[in-house]
Amino acid sequence: MQGLDLGLLLAPFVAGLLVLATHVPLGIEVLRRGIIFIDLAVAQVAAFGAVAASLVDLDAMLPYFGPHGLGAQLAAGLAAVAGALLLTWTERRWPDIQEALIGLVFVFAAAAGILLLAHSPHGGEHLRDLLAGQLLWVSWQQLLPVAMLYVGVLALWLGPAQRWPRLGFYLLFAVTVTASVQLVGVLLVFTSLIAPAVATRAFSGARRIVLAYAMGAAGYAMGLGLSLYVDLPAGATVVCCLCLLALGGLGVSGRRPAS
């Protein structure tokens, strides 16, 4: 890899580790509850909020914060919380079709985002960035507010959140996904949650957590390195590597159920 500056990958790799710090335990819980696509739906709703904020130039009215303006962060967060509240209500009202309703929320948010950007000259580029993210261009300044938020999320998750009702889980999930979507994109949010959880389903307890973190870190390292070496989009490359590692993990563990 002569001539390539591997230092460019350090901040993106740390961003991936930060995302994994919260998404690994949340992803295992999502898999346990059987609401696999809730993260994809909430992430897409958060992305819709960010799109709406960009169209009204809300960022210009508020100071800079994180990877995007404060306006985008607030709009995405409010949209994600609204989506979480909606899904909490639908689960109580129609629990037998919750997965189908989660899917409808996802496609509605995705389609609505496309409609909002239909007449924007940079609409296609904006949608691509929201889906695949711009992981390779993440800076250290962007990571600090996200890291602070994730510390709070982990403190709640390891403490009182374990005793919260389902609404509390949904809201904590929405806040986490909001920051993650604007850092790494919708596709990596979903993959970072589900791939490590799927790959380690045959294990339990602390061993599962450690293996899931290791698998996720390996996926980010492989994907970032490959993207720089072959000049491919970083986010999409990491997604593919995480998915392949998840399939490999399933193959190694066989059909042995979680103990």
Image (tube, rainbow, N blue to C red):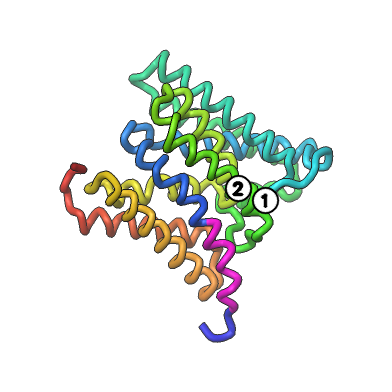
Alpha-carbon neighbours of circle 1 within 10 Å: few (<14), some, or many (≥20)? many
Q: Residue at x 53, y 58 (%)?
A: 235
| Real-space CA distance between mark 2 and mark 1, rounded to the nearest whole angstrom | 9 Å
The residue pinned by badge 2 equals 146
Whether pointer 2 and pointer 1 mark residues with C-beta atoms closer than 8 Å, the reply is yes
Which SS type dominates the magenta stretch? helix
Point out the image quarter for the C terminus: top left
Classify mark 2: helix, strand or loop: helix
Residue receiving disc 1: 67
Residue type, label 2:
Val
Extreme bottom residue here? 2
181 relative to 168 in the view: left or right:
right
Residue 9 on the magenta segment = yes
Amino acid bearing label 1: Pro
Rendering coords of residue 104 (x, y %): 48, 28
Disc on the earlier residue, 2 or 1: 1
**Residue for point 49% across, 47% down:** 189
Q: Residue 233: give x, y in percent of width and height.
A: 55, 63
Residue 194 image point, x, y percent: 39, 45
Q: Residues within 10 Å of mark 2 (few under 14, many from 20)?
A: many
User: Element at badge 1?
Assistant: loop
Q: Residue at x 36, y 37 (%)?
A: 29
Magenta stretch, residue numbers: 5-15
